[in-house]
Amino acid sequence: MSKDTRRRYSEEFKADTVDLVEEQGYGVSEAARRLGIDRSILARWRRERREQAISGSSRPKGDERDAELRQLREENRKLRIEREILKRQQPSSPTN
C-alpha cells in the first residue's frame, strides 16, 4: 500500500487558476476538471484570496509563517549562546 504524495502548487499557479474563475468566467468545477485538480482546492484558493483582499494583505500566509519561523529560530540561537556563556561564568562546585 503506497501513500500518496501531497501535490504542491506555486503561488503563480494558484493565482492564475483563481483568475480563470473570477476574470475569465469559468465555473469552479469546470476549471478544476480542466486543470486536473480537486474542486475543493480551487474553492479554498478563491476563499483565501478573498480573505487576503479583505484584510489588505498581499503576502500569502505561508510567507508570514516562514518569516516568523526564521525569527524564532534566530532568537533560539541567541538564547542558546547566552546560556552557554552563563554556564561558563558560574563557579564550579567544590569537590569533596
Image: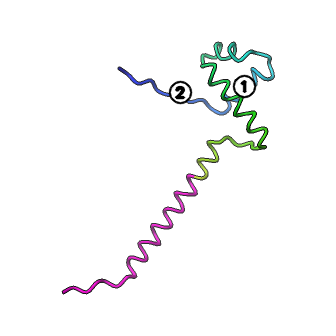
Does the segment drawn in magenta span residue 83?
yes
**Do callouts 1 and 2 mark residues in contact (Cβ within 8 Å)?**
no
Q: Which mark is residue 7?
A: 2
- Amino acid type of the residue that numbered disc 2 sits on in the rendered structure: Arg
Does the segment drawn in magenta span residue 34?
no
Quick one: label 2, few (<14), some, or many (20+) residues within 10 Å?
few
According to the image, label 1 marks what residue? 18
Dividing the picture into quadrants, the one containing residue 34 is top right
Dividing the picture into quadrants, the one containing residue 94 is bottom left
Q: Which residues are magenta?
A: 69-96
Most common SS among magenta residues: helix
Q: Judge whether 37 appears above or below 57 on screen.
A: above
Quarter of the image where the C terminus is located: bottom left
Q: CA distance from mark 1 to mark 2?
A: 17 Å
Dividing the picture into quadrants, the one containing residue 72 is bottom right
Residue farthest along the left direction in this orientation? 96
Residue pictured at 41% horizontal, 72% vertical: 84
